[in-house]
Structures are given as structure tokens and as C-alpha cells.
Amino acid sequence: MHEFRVMVVGGYGFFGSRLVRRLARQKALHIVVVGRSGAKAQALVDALLPDAHAGLSAVAVDAMDPGLQARLQEHGIHLLIHTSGPFQGQDHRVAQACAHAGVHYVDLADGRDFVGGITALQAAALARGVLLTSGASSVPALSTAVADRLAGGMACVDSIDIGISPGNHTERGLSTVAGILSYCGKRLASAGPQPVFGWSGSWRHRYPEPVGARLLSPCDVPDLVLLAPRYAGKPGVRFGAGLELAFLHRGMNAMAWLARLGLVRDWSVHAAWLKRAADCFKDWGSDAGAMHVCVRGRDAQGFVQERLWVLVAGSGDGPYVPTLAASALARKLAAGQLPAVGAMPCMGLLTLEDFEQEARGLDIRMREIHP
């Protein structure tokens, strides 16, 4: 059988290691785990090899090195998956190297500007017949697949509300913390008349048990600018994220106010010690997290419709959710099912059924709820 070679950048990191674990179940793949530390990459390979269905190998590679294109060709790579964030502030040199090498590219970015900016590489992607897609994560890949399902049959979509709240036991990767802090107190994209600031203000959403009610606050994600043009009616889009422990969440609200007052310019530079402080309470709360998408609109007769989808993750499996899109795309590409050619945000490339397939074996439950 032809071996489809996948290079995972940051493959031993927080999300990268979980993605590699999922990919290792796919027989048609050979996974090359890479990062700056060859020893760490090899340690993960050694741990997974006994039960892996895929081939596994490790190599030290700095993805930001100008020689990445040559390394891709040297190792015969068909697909590169970039998991090494934070993506806020990164450029697209990794995707550009993939285009020049004729290699498909997928990343797990959720930074608004980074995900939208991938389209600048459209000509390069088309010239080599490859897919370069950004945002193969909970947003916008999964959120779009859900919104597409819920909006089906609606003549007009009025609003889309999205929220994510991980369990407090969930590990916090430093790059994830830095990405979240980068827009704390900063003005976000908003279609409404009132300005919206990251982590400023909050509302409460009730999820199914064992998650229950969680506080949510505004966060900067690609969906804020990419979802509305996708649907008739150009709906208003709201996205909120939350921390399980209310006092930590309120702390983020207070930090947002300090930033808005100009007392702190950029909270992300303090990510390391803030992560250590939050980790002091990691044994509090639970390992249950959730995500929801609610779409409100009208049918052809003008009757109002509201549809709600919910994901609940337990047993500490929540961090696998952002890896499901990349795993599904690797499966399709290995099977010769190229979903598109060009450079684009990861929207409309996968269906909700694709995510459900990749979540099998994990404590992740998805269902539509009729309000």
C-alpha cells in the first residue's frame, strides 16, 4: 500500500502530541514527528510505536528555518500539519515553503488575522495543485461544519452564537495561554454598533451535565469575520470562551479592564507566570468541558427557527477536539480525496460527520438539542 507521509510540526507539543496519537491509528500513514528537539520527538515515537497502526519516525526540524522546503522534499512529505502556536503574530512562511515544495499544508491556528491571511498564497497553491488551509481547529473548522448543518433549510440566518469552556483540569499549553492573552482587553471585530473587547464583560451559558453553567466572555476568533458572509442574511456572530472556575474567569475580566485603561499594554508577555499562577488551582473543578453553536434564523415562510448543537468532553479528552479537523483532512488526503485546491481558511472542507468519525474512541459526545 502507498504510504502517505505526514510531517507534524510541533508534534510533541500540547496539541501536536494529541494529534499524532490520533493519526497513529490510521494504517495508510507514515507520521514524521518534528520539532526543535529531536530527543523529544523520538521519545513520543518510542512511546507510541508498540500500539501504532501508522509508521512513525522522528527528526529535528526548525519549521521557521529557510531550509524547510528542502527538508520536506528530502523526507518525501505529502502533507505538513503545523501545530506550533501561538499563531498570533506568525507569518505564513511554513505554508509558503509547502506550496513551493508541492506539499499540502494544514494548521491548527485560531488567530483571526493568521487564518484569514492564508488566502495571500492562493496563486502559489493553485500553481502546484495543493491545498493550503488554515484554522483546522475547533474554530473555524468545527464551528463552520456545525453552523452549516444547523442553518440548513433556513432562508435567512439572523445570528450565530458560539461558546467554548474547557474543564479546569485540562492542561494549559503555554502557547495557548499566550494566544488568549494577546487580545485580552483589545478591541475585537464586531458587526454590532457597540465596541467589543476581549475578555471584557461576561454572560452565562448552561451546558448539559456534568458541565453545567459556565461564564463566557468575548474572544477573538476567525468566525467573527468569516462566518457572516457565508449565510443569507449576514448574521451577527458572537463568540465566547470561559474558564470553569468563576474567580479565574473574573480575574480575566479584571485584566481586560486594566488593559483597556492602558495600565498593561500586552498581557501575553506575562503568559509564563500567569500560567504558573493558574496551574496552582489545576486540581480544582473538573475535567469536563463543552462547546456550543446556536443558530437563529427564519424559514421560507418567515417563521423563526432556533437550533442548538452541543459538544461535551469528559475524561480530560477536551484538548483532542482541536485536532479532529487535521486528523480528518489527513485521512481524506491519504485516500486521494482532495477536498479542494488553493489557499483558504478551513471552512466547508469537512462535514459534521467527519468530526464524529474522528472522535470515536474518545469521551466526546455531540448532539443537536431542540430548544
Image: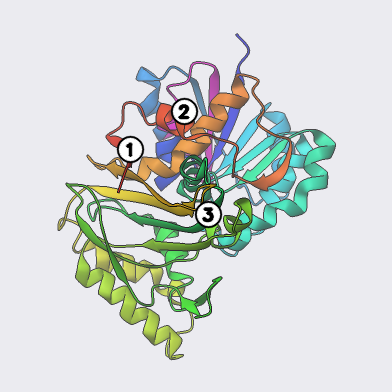
Asked if residue 196 lies in the magenta stretch, the reply is no
Residue 23 - label: 2
Foreground of the two, 168 or 353 = 353
The magenta stretch is 20-43
- Outermost residue toward the front in this view: 301
Asked whether residue 13 is in view, the answer is no
The percent position of residue 124, horizontal first and vertical second, equals 81, 44
Q: Which residue is mark 3?
A: 157
Quarter of the N terminus within the rendering? top right
Residue 97 percent coordinates (x, y): 73, 44
Q: Identify the mark nearer the N-term, 3 or 1.
A: 3
Query: Horizontally, is 361 left or right of 147 in the view?
Result: left
Query: For the view shown, which residue lies furthest in the left direction?
Result: 284
- Secondary-structure class at tag 1: strand
How far apart in space, not on screen, are marks 2 and 1 (Cα)?
24 Å
Q: Residue at x 60, y 37 (%)?
A: 349
* Residue 5 figure quarter: top right
Mark linked to residue 367: 1
Does the magenta-highlighted stretch encompass residue 25? Answer: yes
The residues tagged by marks 2 and 3 sit, at their Cα atoms, a distance apart of: 36 Å
Badge 3 element: strand
Looking at numbered disc 3 in the image, what kind of residue is underneath it?
Answer: Val
Q: Is residue 114 left or right of residue 125?
A: left
Separation (CA) of disc 3 from disc 1: 21 Å
Contact between marks 2 and 3 (CB within 8 A): the answer is no
Q: Amino acid at mark 2?
A: Leu
